[in-house]
């Protein structure tokens, strides 16, 4: 298995890390954007990411996995197959016919569900999935994630009883890519300043 430093470079070279003045969700602008959906076209990278997430998961008591739609679903699926751990899926939209399910798959109440996510910024999309899982009677206390953007999401999740375990924090990832010659020192400084200025709070979603 590749090291985290090697994986970071592979993710950048595959186009999962993009630089520029980029518009993100809700009109936010960011100097660095992450599109981990591209790794479905790079099986070896997807396998490496899943294996590193599995290492984090071994430290967490869980009976079942759930990937946040859509980017984390293939990662959760690979983890499920590799570890023979059952997986469920939270639908992005509730099924409007037949069973009208929100959660797909087989589970029982009070099972410990480990949530898998690609990127956490405010924690909003992750909390939405966690809320649905808890409403279904599942216990959710942890989430493993590829990247924590360090913009308040981890604190928001903690306030809601969820501990975040990331492969990368954004400052660490930026430094790795700088050491590998992918990011300039100026880019690292811009990203560091962006993290300081653009923060989400526990009780509100104010951002820069």
Image (tube, rainbow, N blue to C red):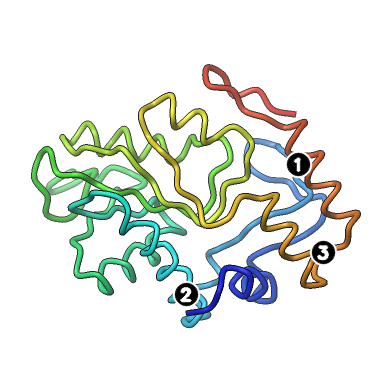
Q: On residue 48, which mark appears?
A: 2
At x 33%, y 37%, the residue is 130
Q: Is residue 189 above or below residue 49?
A: above
Q: Is residue 88 above or below residue 50?
A: above
- Return the residue found at the far top: 203
Disc 3/disc 2 C-alpha distance (Å):
22 Å
At x 48%, y 69%, the residue is 49
Query: Do callouts 3 and 1 mark residues in contact (Cβ within 8 Å)?
Result: no
In which quadrant will I find the C terminus?
Answer: top right
Q: Which residue is mark 3?
A: 183
Closer to the chain start, of discs 3 and 2, is 2
Which marked residue is nearer to the observer: mark 3 or mark 1? 3
Q: On residue 83, which mark appears?
A: none
Residue 129: image location, x then y, percent = 35, 40
Mark 3: few, some, or many residues within 10 Å (few <14, many ≥20)?
some
Residue nearest the observer in this picture, 81 or 155: 155
Closer to the chain start, of discs 3 and 1, is 1
Report the number of discs: 3
Tell me the element at label 2. Answer: helix
Residue 137: image location, x then y, percent = 15, 34
Q: Which residue is mark 1?
A: 29
Tell me the element at label 3. Answer: loop
At x 40%, y 38%, the residue is 163
Closer to the chain start, of discs 2 and 1, is 1
């Amino acid at each position: 298995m590749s090291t985290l430093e090697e994986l970071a470079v592979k993710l950048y070279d595959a186009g999962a890390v993009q630089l520029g003045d980029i518009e993100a969700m809700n009109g936010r602008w960011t100097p660095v954007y992450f599109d981990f959906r591209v790794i479905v076209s790079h099986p070896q990278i997807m396998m490496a990411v899943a294996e590193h997430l599995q290492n984090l998961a071994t430290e967490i008591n869980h009976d079942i996995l759930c990937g946040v739609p859509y980017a984390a679903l293939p990662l959760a699926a690979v983890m499920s197959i590799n570890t023979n751990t059952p997986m469920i899926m939270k639908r992005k939209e509730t099924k409007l016919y037949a069973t009208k399910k929100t959660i797909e798959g087989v589970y029982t109440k009070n099972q410990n569900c480990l949530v898998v996510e690609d990127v956490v910024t405010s924690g909003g999309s992750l909390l939405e999935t966690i809320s649905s899982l808890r409403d279904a009677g599942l216990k959710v206390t942890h989430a493993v994630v590829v990247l924590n953007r360090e913009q308040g999401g981890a604190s928001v999740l903690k306030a809601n009883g969820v501990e975040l375990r990331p492969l990368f924090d954004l400052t660490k990832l930026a430094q790795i890519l700088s050491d590998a010659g992918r990011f300039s020192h100026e880019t690292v400084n811009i990203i560091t300043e962006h993290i300081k200025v653009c923060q989400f709070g526990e009780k509100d979603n104010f951002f820069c």
